[in-house]
Amino acid sequence: MEQAELENDTVGRKNAIPQNMLGRLYIRIMSLSKHRHAMKALAAVSFVESSVFPIPPDAMMIPMVLAKPRNAFWIATVCTVASVLGGLLGYFIGYGLWETVGKPLVEMYGYDENISEFTIRYNDWGAWIVFTAGITPFPYKVITIASGLTRLDLTIFICASILSRGLRFFVVAALLYRFGEPIRTFIEGNLGKFALLFVLSLFAGFVLIKWLM
C-alpha cells in the first residue's frame, strides 16, 4: 500500500519530487523501524506526512507490527493520533499560510493546476473528501491544506480525519496481527483499492438511505 501511495504522489506529475530521491528517503524511513526510538520516529513521520512529508507512515508501521505483533494496535494508535495532529498542521497551513507555505507545497506535489477548480465546491463534500483521502492512496497532505484553504468546518475535518486515519491504520494492524508476514504483499498491493471500494460503497449506502427517506 505504501508503494502505491508513493507512486500516486509522484508518477506523471511535472513538479513532483524526483523518484530516485524518494526511493532513498523511503529506504531511510523503513530503516527507522529498527531504531531503539522507533515509536517516536513513527509518530514524527506520521505527523509530518499529513502536511509536508512525501513518505507514508506505513513504511515504518508494517515492519514494526511484524516485528512486535503484540504492539500492533498501540502502533496503530500512535499512527492515528500523530497523523490527525499533523493534519491539523496542514489545515492551518492552508488557512493562514497558503501563499508562503501551502501553495509551494501543493505545487511541489504537482496539484497546483487543479487546486482552484478543486476548491470551488469543496465544502459541499468536505467530510467525504477528507474521509476518502484519509484511507486511500490519494495524498492526505493535499487535502489537509485544501481544507484549511477553503475554511472547511474544523469539527468536520477533525472527525473525518480521526475516522479515516483510524480505519486505515487499524485495518492494516489487524491484518498483520492476524496473518503476519504472508499478508504483507497483499496489504502493500491491494489495500488501497479495497479502501476505495469501501468508501464508494459507504457513500452509495448514504445516498440510498437519503433517497428512501
Image: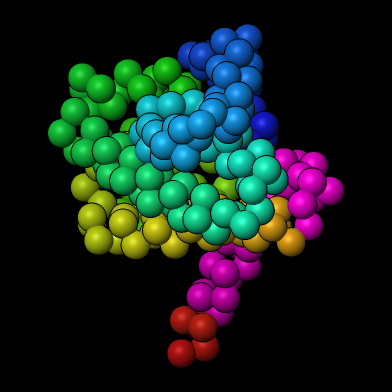
Secondary structure mostly seen in magenta is helix
Observer-nearest of 125 and 44: 44
User: Which range of residues does the magenta coloring cover?
Assistant: 179-208
State whether residue 164 appears in this view. no
Place of residue 25 in the rendered image (x, y in percent of width and height, measured from the top left)? 56, 17
Q: Which residue lies furthest to the left in this view?
A: 96
Observer-nearest of 67 and 30: 67
- Which residue occupies 51% across, 74% down? 207
The answer to if 73 sits in the magenta stretch is no
The mark total stands at 0
Observer-nearest of 51 and 33: 33
Q: How is the image coloured?
A: rainbow
Q: In this view, does 31 lie to the left or right of 120?
A: right
Relative to 174, say whether 146 is above or below. above
Q: Which residue lies furthest to the right in this view?
A: 182
Place of residue 82 in the rendered image (x, y in percent of width and height, measured from the top left)? 38, 45
Relative to 3, say whether 76 is above or below. below
Place of residue 168 in the rendered image (x, y in percent of width and height, measured from the top left)? 56, 54
Relative to 142, say whether 178 is above or below. below
Q: Is residue 42 left or right of residue 159?
A: right
- Which residue occupies 21% across, 19% down? 100
The answer to if 192 sits in the magenta stretch is yes
Relative to 86, say whether 122 is above or below. below
Observer-nearest of 142 and 57: 57
State whether residue 66 appears in this view. yes
Query: Which quadrant is home to the N terminus?
Result: top right
- Which residue occupies 63% across, 20% down? 27
- Which residue occupies 27% across, 38% down? 89
Place of residue 210 in the rendered image (x, y in percent of width and height, measured from the top left)? 46, 81
Name the quadrant containing residue 3: top right
Q: Residue furthest bottom?
A: 213
